[in-house]
Image (cartoon, helix red, strand yellow):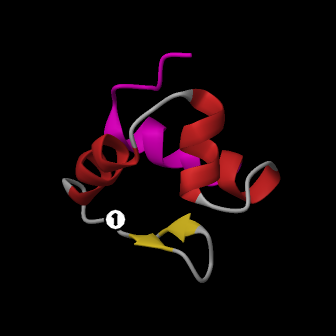
């Protein structure tokens, strides 16, 4: 699956997936064969950080 390129759309997509389907970012990345560092870097560009305690980017 190809992740959205636009960081705001990516943020919405990832947070929805984490809330509804996955217990962690690592689990999401494993299931979707993607790199967590790429997601983290993309969302850091718009000042969002992954919080493992809440399992979301905020």
Left or right of 20? Residue 53 is left
Q: Is residue 58 above or below residue 21?
A: below
Residue at image position (30%, 49%) is 37
Q: Main secondary structure of the magenta part?
A: helix
Residue at numbered disc 1: 48
Q: State the residue in front, 5 or 35.
A: 35
Q: State the residue in front, 29 or 42.
A: 29
Left or right of 58? Residue 1 is right
Q: Is residue 1 above or below residue 16?
A: above
Check residue 9 for magenta coloring.
yes
- The N terminus - image quarter: top right
Q: Position of residue 50 (x, y in %)?
A: 43, 68
Residue at image position (73%, 53%) is 22
Q: Which residues are magenta?
A: 1-16
Q: Position of residue 14 (x, y in %)?
A: 56, 46
Q: Disc 1 on helix, strand or loop?
A: loop
Q: Residue furthest bottom?
A: 53
Q: Residue furthest right?
A: 20
């Amino acid at each position: 699956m190809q992740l959205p390129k636009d960081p705001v759309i990516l943020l919405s997509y990832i947070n929805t997936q984490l809330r509804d389907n996955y217990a962690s970012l690592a689990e999401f990345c494993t299931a979707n064969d993607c790199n967590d560092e790429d997601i983290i870097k993309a969302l850091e560009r718009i000042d969002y950080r992954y919080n493992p305690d809440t399992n979301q980017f905020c």
